[in-house]
Image (spheres, rainbow, N blue to C red):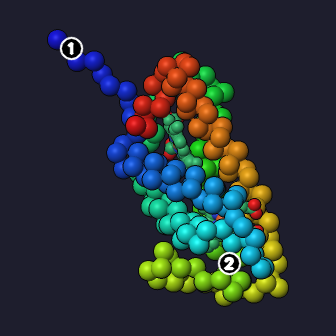
Amino acid sequence: MASIPGPVRYNQTARALHWIIAALVLLNLVTGLLGETLEELQIPAPSHLATGILILLLSLVRLGWRLTWRAPPHAADVSPLLRKVARVTHLSFYALMLVMPITGWIFVSASKYPISMYGLFLWPKLPLTKAMPIVGAATEAHEILGYGFAALAALHIGAALYYHFALKDQTLRRML
Ligand code: HEM
Ligand code: HEM
């Protein structure tokens, strides 16, 4: 009896990194958007900073790994336009997974707040002061890109669920 081929999937390391980073990013979007105002900065939960740095480190590993393989081919019925939208979304995600933590690291470096890695050790701060234009720009960018990241995540997750539950195709299974 011929075996029925399973869906073409992303490799195991890619799948594991996707879900770990996705959970951490969603957590940071929530803690960021729900942050309470303290003195000079609206510091979210202290774990927001540590989790953001962890996302940066894991994303560097993920990007390095990503350069060593090609994504599994799309099913034939995925239109060229949709492939383009997915490609732009995924590239933007990779950029945001680096730019969000780096901008956070920049402006917190210029504040009085330590970057404690879950109470285990202190993450080094960059030699920056508030007067430097890059610090103001990083603060603005972190806020604006944060909203962009949340919107893109809603689009990405909505699309994954739509393809799985409404169209009942293999898209979500590629990442499971
Ligand atoms: C992928 C990682 C990250 C995501 C998705 C993220 C997301 C966000 C979001 C959505 C906000 C709310 C923006 C606003 O309403 O002003 C925020 C605020 C903030 N984030 Fe992050 N963040 C990340 C990494 C970091 C890192 C690494 C740090 C510092 C080491 C950091 C420090 C802060 C601080 C201090 C605020 C409050 C900013 C303010 O008062 O204007 N974030 N973050
Ligand atoms: C905000 C959190 C998330 C981020 C940052 C993220 C990021 C990414 C990235 C960068 C890719 C491209 C992988 C590559 O080709 O290298 C991807 C693919 C994928 N993601 Fe997410 N993801 C998130 C959450 C989710 C969630 C919650 C789901 C499911 C409901 C999901 C389902 C998928 C699927 C099915 C693919 C494969 C798409 C394809 O084959 O073209 N993602 N994700």
Name the residue that disc number 2 marks: 108
Please indicate whether residue 174 sits to the left or right of residue 34 in the image. Answer: left
Q: Residue furthest top?
A: 1
**Camera-side residue of 58 and 116:** 116
Characterize the local packing of mark 2: few (<14), some (14-19) or many (20 or more) Cα atoms within 10 angstroms. many
Q: Considering only order in the chain, which callout, 1 or 2, is on the residue closer to the N terminus?
A: 1
Disc 1 marks a residue whose amino acid type is: Ala
**Which residue is at 72% across, 67% downward?**
36
- Secondary element under disc 2, as helix, strand or loop, is helix
Q: How many marks?
A: 2
Numbered label attached to residue 2 = 1
**Which residue is at 58% across, 52% downward?**
26
**Camera-side residue of 168 and 43:** 43
**Camera-side residue of 151 and 7:** 151
Residue 136: horizontal and vertical position, in percent? 81, 74
Disc 2 marks a residue whose amino acid type is: Val
Q: Residue furthest left?
A: 1
Image quadrant of ligand 1?
Answer: bottom right
Residue 175 sits in quarter: top left
Residue 77: horizontal and vertical position, in percent? 54, 18
**Which residue is at 66% across, 27% downward?**
81
Q: Is residue 174 above or below residue 68?
A: above
Residue 117: horizontal and vertical position, in percent? 50, 76
Q: Are marks 2 and 1 in contact (CB under 8 Å)?
A: no
Q: Is residue 101 above or below residue 158?
A: below
Residue 137 sits in quarter: bottom right
Please indicate whether residue 16 sits to the left or right of residue 48 in the image. Answer: left
For label 2, being within 8 Å of ligand 1 is answered yes
Please indicate, yes or no, whether residue 63 appears anywhere in the rendered image.
Answer: no
